[in-house]
Amino acid sequence: MLKGNTAIITGGSRGIGAAIALKLASLGADIVLLDIGNEDKAAEVREKAEKEFGVKTGYYSCNVADFEQTKAVAARIGKEFQNVTVLINNAGITRDGLILTMNEAQFDDVISVNLKGAFNMIKHCSRMFMKNKCGRIVNISSVSGLSGNAGQANYSASKAGLVGLTKTVAREFASKNITCNAIAPGFIATDMTADITAENNPLAAAIPLGRPGSPEDIAGAAAFLVTAPYVTGVVLRVDGGLGM
Ligand code: NAP
């Protein structure tokens, strides 16, 4: 289904990003993983994708918050991989704290990685998508960005910002066969949420479907959005009903 296409997945070496990378590889896409410096973890994902699905893979260490680094990496990927048409903006961090105690660096760091990082990648990949006459962008937002979450002013703002970015990119590039959609996951079992349980967090206990999501739950939604040419500007909640 995606054979002959290359997908870039930021934060693709572990958690949700790794599951999305493997799902897209299973559909035939060559995959390029980007993260700060988790080359060993990335190697495991790459080996699995190459062995099980026979696709080409790549890894680049890159801080998505850095405008110049993302520019250079996007250019390299364009030279080293064929027909880059998919971008999954998944890299994200948390620096939680109530506003009364949150400092400036906590706020700035989260906005820089989660929101500016997506802008940087979209900015530097969009000409490549136009040249390839196709683009499928998926931004990983969060239910925190839709409903807010006490202790996550920085994170919620970054994820709400991604919703606005998604809809604007969808409008600006619609005429170029470039779609842009967002996924808003609820609680997904990864390193990021390792400390959260139904026992210590009332929101986790309130999931209507009665379980945290898996990275594969998000990967399935990402694969849908990447292969749905008539869907753009959508924010898809994948949260077990949490955000209803
Ligand atoms: P995770 O396990 O903590 O993985 C985060 C990934 O992002 C890692 O690969 C990390 O790279 C990468 N990353 C962090 N900062 C980066 C930077 N500056 N530049 C490049 N890569 C960077 O997180 P996850 O749970 O899979 O979450 C993935 C996405 O889903 C995030 O955007 C998160 O906000 C969102 N989300 C998660 C949940 C959840 O419940 N887990 C819910 C809603 C939304 P390194 O390995 O090099 O550190």
Image (cartoon, rainbow, N blue to C red):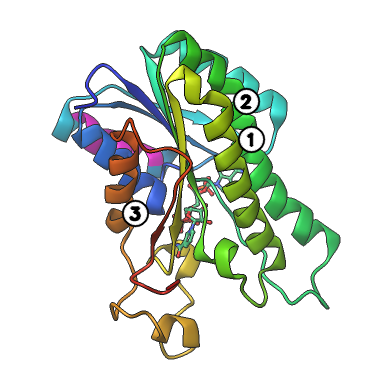
Residue 119 — which label?
Answer: 1
Can you tell me whether the CB of the residue at mark 3 lies under 8 Å from the nearest atom of ligand 1? yes
Q: Which residue is mark 2?
A: 123
- Name the residue at 56% across, 51% down: 92
For the residues bearing labels 3 and 1, Cβ distance under 8 angstroms? no
Q: Earlier in the sequence, mark 3 or mark 1?
A: 1
**Identity, as a three-letter code, of the amino acid under mark 3:** Ile
- Name the residue: 24% across, 26% down: 2
- Taking the magenta stretch, the answer to whether it contains residue 190 is no
Q: Are marks 3 and 2 in contact (CB under 8 Å)?
A: no
Q: Is residue 233 left or right of residue 161?
A: left
Circles 1, 2 touching at the beta carbon (< 8 Å): yes
Q: Which residue is mark 3?
A: 218
Secondary structure, magenta segment, majority class: helix
In the image, is the residue at mark 1 within 8 Å of ligand 1 by its beta carbon?
A: no
Q: Amino acid at mark 2?
A: Lys
Label 3 crowd (10 A; few <14 / some 14-19 / many >=20)? many
Q: Position of residue 201 (x, y in %)?
A: 49, 85
Q: Within 10 angstroms of label 2, few (less than 14), some, or many (20 or more) residues?
A: some
Above or below: residue 150 compared with residue 18: below
Q: Disc 3 to disc 1, how far (Cα)?
A: 21 Å
Q: Of label 3 and label 2, which has the lower sequence position?
A: 2
Q: Which residues are magenta?
A: 42-50
Q: Quadrant of the N terminus?
A: top left
Callout 1: few (<14), some (14-19), or many (20+) C-alpha neighbours within 10 Å?
many
Horizontally, residue 153 falls left or right of residue 169, namely: right
Compared to residue 89, the image places residue 239 above or below, namely below
Look at 64% across and 35% down and name the residue there: 119
Residue beneath the point at 28% across and 36% down: 24
